[in-house]
Amino acid sequence: MSMKIRELVEAKARAAKNASRTLALCSTKVKNEALSQMARGLEEKAAMILEANRADLDRARSRGYARAFLDRLTLTEARIEEMASGLRQVGGLPDPVGKAVEVWRRPNGLEIARVRVPLGVVGFIYESRPNVTADAAGLCLKAGNALILRGGSEALESNSMIATVLAKSVEKAGVPADAIQFIDSSDREAVLALLKLDRYVDLIIPRGGEEFVRLVAERSTVPILKHDKGLCHVFVDEDADLAMAVDIAFNAKVHRPGVCNAMETLLVHQAAAARFLPALAPRLLQAGVEIRGCPRTCALIPAARPAAESDWDTEYLDLILSVKVVESFEEAVSHIRAHGSGLAEAIVTSDYRRARRFTHEVDAACVLVNASTRLVDGGQFGMGAEMGISTSKLHARGPVGVEELTTTKFVVLGDGQVRE
């Protein structure tokens, strides 16, 4: 590993650690003012941010990146305004720091409280979506954490500009600028260096492709919280409201196909398939969706192409959809268990008992009944924004918001008790 890169990353981590001690003691009022300044900074510097984003987009187009990738990379005035709005929403959330989760008194008079506190320093490694830079900075600041950002090389200009604007903005509220660090090296060695800095970094959140997340998990000496791939299913049950099911399936696939909570596989009960698939297919095809189906699906949708076995395990992140007709509820659940990634799974049904069974039997971070998987999002859940959607089971699962970026400590109050 290059000594220069290692020293650069370590210096940023050390500065973040020092800043985290100051930030952890900041009042809610100071943190909210910092978030307000961050939002204002994005709006005031929107032209500079868009110019940096154009440079990233030009480079990505010249390298032949796919349409879905370019969509994730693109910033617009509207998306910058959404970023600013998200920061203000985070400012309006309750501050979890100092909240007593539970309090109890022991027979000897000890009063014990479990209290929420910041994690310390969060290292966030992510790809392609520069709007995530602002989300991560806002959430970490509200939770009292310093942040080290390392975005993908494809968004280097955009992320660097956004991080610079945010760091300068928080200073206006009395928060140290070092609380927001950005590693501006595209060298992979910078990531490897960050993963070994458990002396300064308390948590790593990797957000990207499956192979990338696996690499981080294998190399990190810092605890990690994985944002793994999103191979999401929608199961249309035999007695589903078909009009509702068409709207949900269409939205889950087409609304924004290049993101992790988009549907990749549609499962349809055989009792509903003959009515449902011919109703849905024209809308999908008109939207440019390529349908890859099982033999029953291809018989009902002539425009579909036969699905390969590998399709059931593919996260397309594009306008491609795998469709399978299943014989029963049990087969649908079995298919999800075999091929799902554990991020989000949905059922469309009018049967209360099967809805309850689905929520109990399907193991995923988010399980939905009669709703699109696209709703699995920190903003949609009222959390303001998210660092990602955790597919880990420790210490947080699902959308990672402000509260998930804290830990707890015990505060024990006594009046002279000793252990007998």
Image: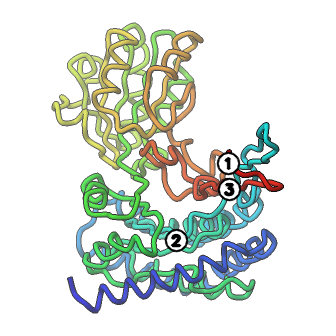
Q: Neighbour class for label 2 at 10 Å: few (<14), some, many (≥20)?
A: many
Q: In which quarter of the image is residue 92?
A: bottom right
| Residue that badge 1 annotates | 419
Location of the N terminus by quadrant is bottom left
Q: Mark 3 to mark 1: distance in Å? A: 26 Å
Earlier-in-chain disc, 2 versus 1: 2
Image depth: mark 3 or mark 1 in front:
1
Query: What residue type is disc 1 on?
Result: Arg
* Residue matched to label 2: 121
Residue 78 at least partly seen = no
* Quadrant occupied by the C terminus: top right
**At 74% across and 65% down in the image, what residue appears?**
91
| Nearest to the observer: residue 411 or residue 108 | 108
Instruction: Say above or below: 135 vs 254.
Output: below
Circle 2: residue type:
Val
Q: What element carries label 3?
A: strand
Residue 189 x %, y %: 25, 78
Q: Is residue 274 left or right of residue 101?
A: left
Give the distance between the C-alpha atoms of the residues marked 2 and 1, in whole angstroms. 35 Å
Q: In this view, does 389 lie above or below 159?
A: above
- SS for dot 1: loop
Which one is nearer the viewer's eye here, 234 or 377? 377
